[in-house]
Amino acid sequence: MKVYINGKYYDKDDAKVSVFDHGFLYGDGIFEGIRLYNKNVFKLPKHIDRLFRSARAIMLDMPWSKQEIMDAVCDACRTNNLTDGYIRLVVSRGKGALGLSPRSCSDPQLIIIADQIQLYPDELYQNGLKAITVPTRRNSHAALPPMVKSLNYLNNILAKIEAQNLGYQECLLLNNEGYVAECSGDNVFIAFEGQLITPPVSAGSLGGMTRQTVIELAKKLGYELIEKPLTRFDVWTADECFLTGTAAKLIPLVELDGRKIGTGKPGEMTNNLIKAFNEVAPVEGVKI
Ligand code: PMP
């Protein structure tokens, strides 16, 4: 596997950034997780748009055009002979002086890792995942806006640790008002009385690419899709629930906080959406 750093490729063990990079020192940087399905980079232009929005939000001047970055992503996939894979695109603030100020950093680093990922075993896609609500709240819009896909993931990592300490692989994070925000790295949907419901991003979730794809697929399948604030009660008493994310794709959630969701098995709408997603994913995207 070869890692792309600023236009050059390095073997895995030689792919390094400076310890003075503020991405390393402070989590000062941004990233994208992107999927390659059947030699198509899924929703690549949309991922790059989101990356540039993250950059704008943290005032990181991107010295590359969107096209240059897209070309580099495709090149990294070709260089690694990938047909299917997971692409981690990282932009760090670059090397600088000790001290928070990004003004001492003038050389942002563009890193592309094109590899494989299997987040959950197949069994969980068949039978569903169990999760627990954790005490850690989602970052507030007034602190670190959750829409920024930044290199500082401690909020989500703390939540994940809390879940794992209790024997769960995934967790639900609420926002400061107590409404459902999202899971540690995935958006949340429920099905209730035939409607598909997901919290608005204003509730503290990332504007997920997979979330957006599901919203589009739901319309195609004729499902009524509503974005509205959800409480834990809504999830506990839903007919179905599933999570969406680039790495996880769509995965059924069959239990939250010890309450069985619906029948406790992946539901019909969930399974139909998984099927629809698996059909569009390999054909929608930028050919490498
Ligand atoms: N929320 C968070 C916090 C995430 O990190 C991610 C991406 N892993 C998502 C939601 C899902 O977004 P996407 O579908 O774009 O991967």
Image: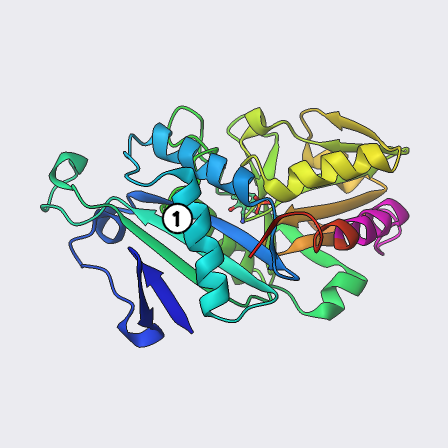
**Residue at x-position 23% and y-position 60%:** 17
**Residue at x-position 55% and y-position 57%:** 288
Element type where label 1 sits in the image: helix
Q: Is residue 274 magenta?
A: yes
**Up-down relation of residue 44 to residue 167 (above or below):** above
**Residue 93 quadrant:** top left
Determine whether the beta carbon of the residue marked 1 sits less than 8 angstroms from the nearest atom of ligand 1: no
**Residue 248 quadrant:** bottom right
**Residue at x-position 31% and y-position 75%:** 13
Q: Amino acid at mark 1?
A: Leu
**Residue at x-position 52% and y-position 42%:** 47
Estimate the x, y position of residue 196 in percent, counting from the top left: 80, 34
Left or right: residue 205 versus residue 155 is: right
The residue that disc 1 covers is: 154
Q: Is residue 69 visible?
A: yes
Estimate the x, y position of residue 177 in percent, counting from the top left: 55, 25
Left or right: residue 244 versus residue 123 is: left
Q: Quadrant of the N terminus?
A: bottom left
Packing grade of label 1 (10 A; few <14, some 14-19, many >=20) is few
Q: Quadrant of ligand 1?
A: top right
Estimate the x, y position of residue 86 in percent, counting from the top left: 54, 60
**Residue 121 quadrant:** bottom right
Instruction: Judge by depth and name the residue closer to the eye, 238 or 210.
Output: 210
Where are the magenta residues, as a range? 262-277
Display colour scheme: rainbow
Q: Is residue 25 magenta?
A: no
Q: Main secondary structure of the magenta part?
A: helix
Estimate the x, y position of residue 43 in percent, counting from the top left: 60, 44
